[in-house]
Amino acid sequence: MNTPGKDYTHHSWLAAAALIAVLVAVSFIPPQSVGGVKLRRANILSDLLSFDDAEAAEPAAEPALFDEEEFHIDMAAGGSVGAPLDKAVPVFVQREEDTDVLRRSGFARVEVLGEETVFAGIRLSKTPGRHGTIIPCGPSCGVVFRHPDEKTLYVAGDTIWFDGVAESLRRYRPDVVVVNACAAELLDEGRLIMDDADVAALHAARPEARIIVSHMDTVPHAALTRQDMDQALRRRGIREAVFMPDDGQSADF
C-alpha cells in the first residue's frame, strides 16, 4: 500500500512570507554604531542611467584617470584591464606603480600626473588626498585643471578634509571644487571621504568657490544620503553654496 507523499507547498509559502517580513523589518532598523562607525543598510538609491549606444561607442576625446587600487574589480585573469577601451586614449595615473598594469594592458600613452602636467593646453596638477580617518584606504589624489579661458576646477578625489586639501585651496584658488561627500565608511579605515562637516570646512576655507558634491545615493557603504546631506547643509546655512546634482544632471559654471 502506497503512502501519499507530504505536500510541502504550504510550508514553502510560509517560509517565503517569513523571509519577506524579516527583510522589511530590517529595512526600518535605525543606523547602528560599531567602534564609532555608523552602519547603515545599502544606500544605492539611484537607478542606473542609460546612454545612447552610438555615442558610447565613439572614442573618448579626453584622457582617462586610473588608479591601480581600483583595477581589481575589472582586472582580467591575465592581469590586464580596460579590454573594451580605446588603447590610443591618453591615460594619466597617480603614481609610477600604476603604469605597469596599463602598459601591460596595451595602453600606449600612459603618464604619471605631476604638479605641472600639460594636456591639450590644460594644466593638470596632482594634489594630495587622505582616503580614511583611521587608516588610509590606499593612496589617493586630486587633480586641479587650469586653462586661461576657463574657471579653475579642483577635483578633490577620494579624500577627507585635512591640511592637504586646505593647502590645495590656498595654492590654486579654484573657482569650482568637486568633492566625494557621502561619508562612506569602513570599519578598519573609518570614514573614507567627506561628510557635511568637511564640506562646511571647505566652504569656510574657500567661500568664493562653488562646491559640487558627488557620490550621493550611489555608494553601498555611504553614511549620508542625498536627503541627509541636503538637510545637514541647510542646518549649517551653506546649502546655497553647494550644488548637489540630480542623477544625470549637468551644469555650466
Image: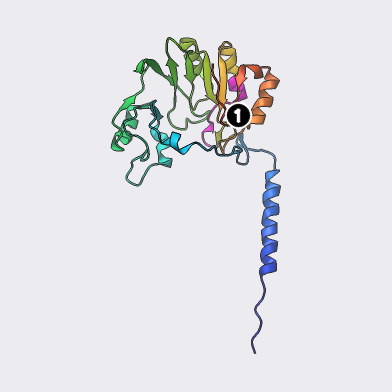
Dot 1 surroundings within 10 Å: few (below 14), some, or many (20 or more)? few
Q: Secondary structure at mark 1?
A: loop
Instruction: Tell me which amino acid carries mark 1.
Output: Asp
Residue 251 spot, x, y in % from top left = 55, 21
Residue drawn at (60%, 41%) of the image: 42
Residue 39 visible in the current orientation: yes
Question: In the image shown, does 233 or 243 lie closer to the viewer?
Answer: 243
| Quadrant in the rendering for residue 109 | top left
The color scheme shown is rainbow
Residue 89 spot, x, y in % from top left = 34, 29
Q: Is 25 colored magenta in this rendering?
A: no
Residue 142 spot, x, y in % from top left = 45, 22
In the rendered image, the residue lying farthest to the front is: 54
Residue drawn at (69%, 66%) of the image: 11
Q: Is 192 colored magenta in this rendering?
A: yes
Residue 235 spot, x, y in % from top left = 70, 21
Q: Is residue 225 left or right of residue 171?
A: right
In the rendered image, the residue lying farthest to the bottom is: 1
Name the image quarter holding the C terminus: top right
Location of residue 182 with respect to 154 vertically, above or below: below
| Quadrant in the rendering for residue 233 | top right
Instruction: Tally the numbered discs.
Output: 1
Instruction: Give the residues drawn in magenta, as a range.
Output: 188-199
| Quadrant in the rendering for residue 219 | top right
Question: In the image shown, does 130 or 90 lie closer to the viewer?
Answer: 90
Label 1, on which residue?
A: 246
